[in-house]
Amino acid sequence: MIKINENYLQLQTSYLFSTIAKRVQAFQQLHPEKEIIRLGIGDVTQPLPTACLNAFHQAVDELGTASSFRGYGPEQGYGFLREAIAIHDFQARGADISPDEIFVSDGAKCDTGNIQELFSNDTRLAIPDPVYPVYVDTNVMAGRAGALKGDRYDRITYLPCTIENGYLPEIPTTSADLIYLCSPNNPTGATLNREQLTAWVEYARKNRSLILFDAAYEAFIRDPDLPHSIYEIPGANEVAIEFRSFSKTAGFTGVRCAYTVVPKACFGYTETGEKVSLHALWNRRHTTKFNGVSYPVQRAAEAVFSPQGQSEIRALTDGYLENAAHIRSVIQQIGFSCVGGDNSPYIWVNTGRDAWDFFDLLLERAGVVCTPGAGFGSCGQGHIRISAFNSHENVVLAMQRIAKALG
């Protein structure tokens, strides 16, 4: 008799975005004549930057001849990409991160889910609410989250993100071992400033905690006073692992390329208190379970850091931020309060109504798909997330429909 991992039975019935897809599909089957505009899932809609596309083509051509063919690459990523990342994303901002502390992967979603394999099952978790579902679900799968009591797990310290605290997590009064932070936040769009991030680093240093810092949306930060990386904070390289992605930055959601930074100064501890290098553990896990991102994809990612690539991804993210600003403006004109949309492609709307009911209302009356906030946690109830990832024309039309439906 094959026995299952019964921790999976503790999961909520289905992943949030698959539930949304099923609801939308059912609606379209009943109303095939209605044109749906999707502002729900955070999937990009604009084509790859030309610099990336050209590099992609050239790298594919290299695989067509024996003299330039490449097979398995280094599991951690090619040196040319790791060096470009270290210089541009960290050293240029005063963060002392070296290329060999960077691990290239096929997605930040995978890395944020897989990283928890390094930690014991009695690790105490602190996770914001609302939050990207992968943080919670992967710990549930591992048996670390405890039992589901109502809509929360009893071994997680939840960090409420509400209108009262600007939708930003506050430092808990109890100690936590593993802390998840996301800035700019998904789903709220709220962003931690330097002072707030410094307080988190000091907490982690004091408690020998580890911060898992998801910076997948840092390319949308326009406020020069906001940090793009946790490593801009002194001492963070001793207590933080950072996740980045090319998905939203350069439209790589279908191409798949991301990276995780595990500094060599970052340590975990055995049960007896002995220090163990997290860099070494992640390298061991990475080389055992992953064969690396393909050569053409890494060449395309490298092109992001060329002058042409930088110009093109700036234009790409500026376009999505223009959409976000329009969404935010219309939402406020209608009379709803919201956050996000300035340094983030997401707008978090306080509807004052049941989140799934409001989702259905926008779908049925306006033909617009959003994401119900309740799917991100209990503090998301009464809210929806609207994504700016669509063409400007579709965003303008969607907001006209929403204004009419709610007017």
Image (cartoon, rainbow, N blue to C red):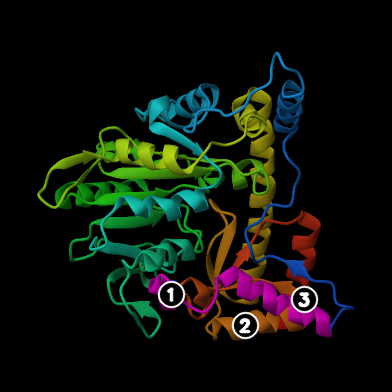
Few, some or many C-alpha atoms within 10 Å of disc 2 (few <14, some 14-19, many ≥20)?
many
174 left or right of 378? left
Q: Residue at x 72, y 66 (%)?
A: 38
* Label located before the other in sequence (3 or 1): 1
Magenta stretch containing residue 31, yes or no? no
- Give the Cα separation between the discs numbered 3 and 1: 48 Å
Which amino acid, by three-letter code, is at mark 3?
A: Gly
55 left or right of 102? right
Above or below, 117 against 101 in this view is: below
Residue 172 image-quadrant placement: bottom left
Question: Residue beneath label 1, please?
Answer: 1
Of helix, strand and loop, which one carries label 1? loop
Which amino acid, by three-letter code, is at mark 2?
A: Phe
Q: Residue at x 44, y 26 (%)?
A: 92
Question: Residue beneath label 2, please?
Answer: 358
Q: Residue at x 29, y 63 (%)?
A: 125
Answer whether labels 2 and 3 touch (C-beta < 8 Å).
no
Position of residue 209 measured from the top left corner of the image (x, y, whole percent): 22, 51
Of helix, strand and loop, which one carries label 2? helix
Magenta stretch containing residue 10, yes or no? yes
User: What is the chief secondary structure element of the magenta stretch?
Assistant: helix
- Give the Cα separation between the discs numbered 1 and 2: 45 Å
Few, some or many C-alpha atoms within 10 Å of disc 3 (few <14, some 14-19, many ≥20)?
many
2 left or right of 176? right
**Residue placed furthest toward the front:** 1
Residue 78 in sight here: yes
Numbered range of the magenta stretch: 3-30
Above or below, 226 against 138 in this view is: above
Nearest-to-viewer mark from 3 and 1: 1
Q: Residue at x 51, y 81 (%)?
A: 382
Question: Residue beneath label 3, please?
Answer: 367
Residue 263 image-quadrant placement: top left
